[in-house]
Amino acid sequence: MDENTIDWNKVWKNQMLKNIESKCAVECARVWNNKERATQYWNAVQNNKEQTQKTIEGLVLTPDSRILDIGAGPGTLTIPISPQVTHVTAVEPSEGMMGVLQDNIAEYEADNITCVQKQWEDVEIEADLDGPYDVVIASYSLGMPDIRESIQKMIDASSRYVYLYWFAGPPSWDTNYKALWPSLHEGDYHPSPNCDVIYNMLYQMGIYPHMQVSPVNHFNRFQSIEEAVEHFRSFYNITTDHQESVLRDYLEAVLEKDNDSLVMNGSYTSVKMWWEKQTGE
């Protein structure tokens, strides 16, 4: 690479590592190891099926399609996609999310789903997957420091389409992190990189994806302030009574009352990037 050319993979890696470091190495997969918290996430997904359906309608699926869902969570896309296709492989590293996903597979009798409990970086295409896949999806699961290597592996696993979903601009939760982090951890919060870095890196790889931008509103509902504190404890790496008090005071200020419950409203700008592999890739 020319010395005057920006290495966008390096830009992504530096920003992602700063994000991980500023969050005291709280990895996303570790946050979701708690099955109860993963169940709450699934319930929130069920309350926003419109967004999930919109995502699925934007995929090229046929009854013969084989799908790879990277960072599948509790089955947000995997479960509703499975009746429409021949096979889904769901890659999900966290114990809690995988537990809920397997419960959902049993409940929905989705016998065409195979689960792989690994970080995407650790997945070996030949040993762990049953490819190739007509469609490879990574939906808000791009927290890998080496994003170029991770996306190249997605391309290698795909026989046709790759779909990536990420963020443009700061999501609402970054506002909360930035407000709280100095008081909680005596340091600044560094957000993760946005979709512009991915686009520029794909461009350097000779990939010119389609792009679609959509505003998304979401919310978390709690029955008590105690439930809210417990929910956010891992996200904010709360380990002391003082930190818990800071978090509680903040939540009491920002949560909105809705009848007998408390609601945290949020929003983000979603960017969908997708492309069809060219012959010979």
Image (spheres, rainbow, N blue to C red):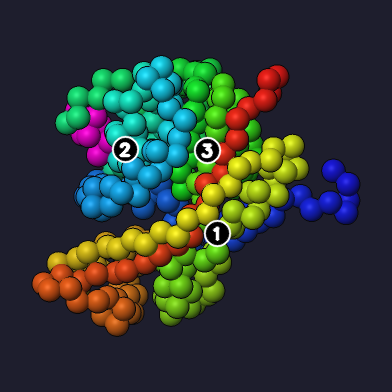
Q: What is the CA distance from the residue labelled 2 to the residue labelled 1? A: 24 Å
Answer with mark 3 or mark 2, whichever residue precedes in sequence. 2
From the viewer's perspective, tell me whether residue 30 is left or right of residue 21. Answer: left
Does residue 22 lie above or below 39 as drawn?
below
Q: Quadrant of residue 234?
A: bottom left
Query: In this orientation, which residue lies closer to the viewer: 148 or 59?
Result: 59
Q: Which residue is mark 1?
A: 168
Does residue 249 lie above or below 177 as drawn?
below
The magenta region covers 99-106
For discs 2 and 1, the disc positioned in front in the rendered view = 1
Does residue 44 lie above or below 98 as drawn?
below
Residue 138 locus on image (x, y percent) = 48, 40
Q: What is the CA distance from the residue labelled 3 to the residue labelled 1? A: 16 Å
Q: Which residue is mark 2?
A: 75
Q: Amino acid at mark 2?
A: Gly
Residue 248 locus on image (x, y percent) = 27, 77
* Structural crowding at the residue carrying mark 1, measured as other residues with C-alpha within 10 Å and reported as few (<14), some (14–19) or many (≥20): some
Q: Quadrant of residue 192?
A: bottom right
Q: Which residue is mark 3?
A: 163
Name the residue rendered at 49%, 28% in the picture.
135
Q: Quadrant of residue 268?
A: bottom left
**Badge 2 vs badge 1, beta-carbon distance below 8 Å:** no
Answer with mark 2 or mark 1, whichever residue precedes in sequence. 2
Answer with mark 3 or mark 1, whichever residue precedes in sequence. 3
